[in-house]
């Protein structure tokens, strides 16, 4: 079966959400301001019916520009990061860096996959990295193609690894930390247990990605041909250089200057990412601050590399153009949530899914809770928003069942975090696939066996947590 175009898929989801607003009863929980997290959270046990507000066909279409407005900060982040990395790419620094990495690895090029996976999993664990990956896709494609791997490998070792890191992280401020606060648990409690589970899950994902990469590796004959062509080109250059010493000296000086500028540009990129991580973890930065940081990085990189004001501006424009489709996908995905919100059925869905858990045994309820959190994440694609919506409902339910609150947080993380890897309502996922030109259906065929494996690891972690009395 061939999946429809991503935009068609998202428009269909918007229309389905509108149809549900005519079928499901409208309802809401009361809400309050939580001082510990600074977020508005639901009050458990206060679900009640409200007047129906079904969403009509035209209103559903209007939700699309509303969704773009709601996701404006994310969309502008994608545009500005995309523009910045187009500038960096235009300088040639990324290609020099990739070539240096390929030469360093040599015949051990497969090691680039675990290195990249660990790096992106760390970013996912620290700050729930997703949207930022969109603009990095051209760089990752350059790396994987240079080593002979396909575009799907680039998505797997970036988005996939980041999602695994986020879903099993003990320090992710948008998942683990906020869920623990809402559950009345100390921040970072159970961190050692979570780190072990994260290590197992990440090792499984790296193995799955490397398995695919080996299968997608292009024929060695093509590499041999490229090597031969490179050797011929090198010989030709050597012959030409031998004719004129002055030309050789000038070429060496120019190459050295380019190498120095590339090193400075790459250093700027690394410094920007270091500031980015610090801003997220220590300064409470949001998307606007991230956008400003990478915009400044792009401007500095262009000027340092000698592109000039005009060349830098033109590179930014080209980057904006390349990110337009990704930005549209994010806005269309957000429109689904807008429709459900205007129809007042999000709380109805949550209430209907969690209410049946009250009569289940402890171990069974934990597994079903993880499944329910997965289902909730489809209409509520924000992990922090889902924590604010579900944890105040889940926490008293866990106490009633005799289920550890720590285990209920594990269920939330595994359900919501891993769901980000496949739900089409995750605009970042759809945008990354579009940027890499990987069809959604192809991604699912690659992902589903690994997703089942990761979901199983999450289930086992909860059962072990129950057995050892994780608190």
Image (tube, grey):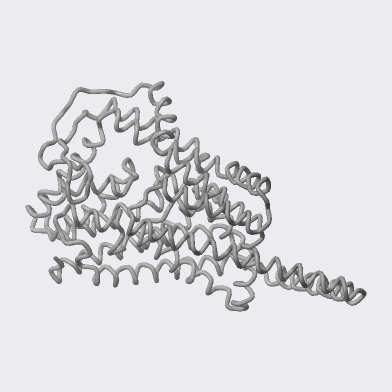
Residue 353 in picture, x, y percent from top left? 21, 43
Q: Quadrant of residue 23?
A: top left
Look at the picture and state if 354 lies above or below 180: above
Tell whether 400 sits left or right of 287: left
Image quarter (top left, top right, bottom left or bottom right) of the C terminus: bottom left
Q: Residue 417: image x %, image y %?
A: 33, 55
Quadrant position of residue 459: bottom left
Residue 136: image location, x then y, percent: 53, 56
Q: Residue at 86%, 72% (x, y): give it.
A: 236
x, y percentage for residue 347?
22, 37
Which residue occupies the foreground of this view, 202 or 316? 316
Q: Nearer the viewer, residue 203 or 166?
A: 166
Q: In this view, does 190 lie to the left or right of 284?
A: left
Q: 103 or 274, which lies in front?
A: 274
Please name whichever residue, 360 or 173, is drawn nearer the observer in this view of the structure.
173
Q: Residue at x 30, y 52 (%)?
A: 416
Asked which quadrant contains residue 385, the reply is top left
What is the tally of numbered marks visible in this picture? 0
Is 126 on the left or on the right of 460, as rendered? right
Residue under the point 40% across and 45% down: 426
Q: In this view, does 106 lie above or below 319?
A: below
């Amino acid at each position: 079966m061939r999946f429809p175009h991503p935009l068609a898929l998202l428009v269909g989801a918007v229309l389905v959400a509108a149809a549900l607003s005519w079928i499901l009863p409208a309802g809401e929980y009361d809400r309050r301001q939580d001082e510990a997290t600074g977020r508005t959270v639901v009050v458990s046990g206060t679900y009640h019916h409200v007047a129906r507000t079904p969403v009509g066909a035209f209103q559903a279409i209007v939700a699309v520009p509303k969704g773009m407005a709601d996701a404006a900060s994310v969309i502008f982040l994608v545009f500005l990061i995309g523009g910045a990395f187009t500038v960096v790419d235009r300088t040639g620094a990324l290609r020099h860096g990739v070539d240096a990495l390929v030469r360093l690895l040599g015949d051990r090029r497969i090691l680039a996959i675990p290195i990249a996976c660990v790096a992106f999993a760390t970013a996912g664990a620290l700050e729930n990295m997703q949207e930022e990956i969109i603009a990095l896709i051209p760089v990752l494609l350059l790396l994987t193609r240079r080593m002979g791997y396909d575009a799907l490998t680039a998505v797997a070792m970036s988005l996939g690894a980041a999602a695994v890191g986020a879903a099993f992280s003990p320090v992710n401020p948008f998942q683990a930390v906020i869920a623990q606060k809402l559950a009345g648990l100390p921040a970072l409690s159970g961190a050692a247990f979570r780190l072990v589970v994260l290590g197992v899950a990440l090792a499984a994902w790296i193995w799955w990605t490397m398995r695919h990469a080996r299968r997608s590796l292009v024929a060695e004959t093509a590499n041999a041909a490229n090597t031969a062509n490179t050797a011929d080109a090198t010989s030709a250059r050597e012959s030409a250089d031998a004719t004129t010493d002055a030309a050789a000296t000038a070429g060496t000086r120019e190459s050295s200057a380019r190498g120095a500028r590339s090193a400075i540009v790459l250093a700027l990129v690394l410094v920007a990412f270091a500031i980015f991580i610090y801003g997220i973890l220590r300064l409470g930065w949001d998307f606007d601050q991230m956008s400003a940081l990478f915009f400044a990085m792009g401007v500095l990189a262009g000027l340092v590399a000698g592109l000039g004001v005009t060349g830098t501006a033109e590179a930014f424009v080209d980057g904006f153009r390349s990110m337009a489709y990704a930005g549209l996908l994010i806005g269309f995905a957000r429109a689904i949530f807008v429709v459900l919100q205007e129809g007042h059925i999000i709380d109805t869905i949550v209430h209907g899914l969690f209410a049946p858990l009250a009569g289940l045994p402890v171990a069974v309820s934990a597994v079903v809770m993880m499944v329910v959190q997965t289902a909730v994440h489809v209409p509520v694609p924000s992990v922090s928003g889902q924590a604010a919506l579900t944890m105040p409902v889940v926490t008293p339910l866990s106490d009633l069942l005799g289920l550890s609150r720590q285990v209920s947080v594990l269920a939330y993380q595994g359900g919501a975090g891993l769901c980000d890897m496949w739900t089409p309502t995750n605009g970042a996922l759809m945008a990354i696939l579009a940027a890499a030109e990987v069809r959604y259906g192809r991604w699912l065929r690659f992902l589903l066996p690994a997703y089942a494996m990761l979901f199983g690891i999450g289930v086992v972690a909860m059962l072990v947590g129950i057995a050892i009395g994780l608190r």
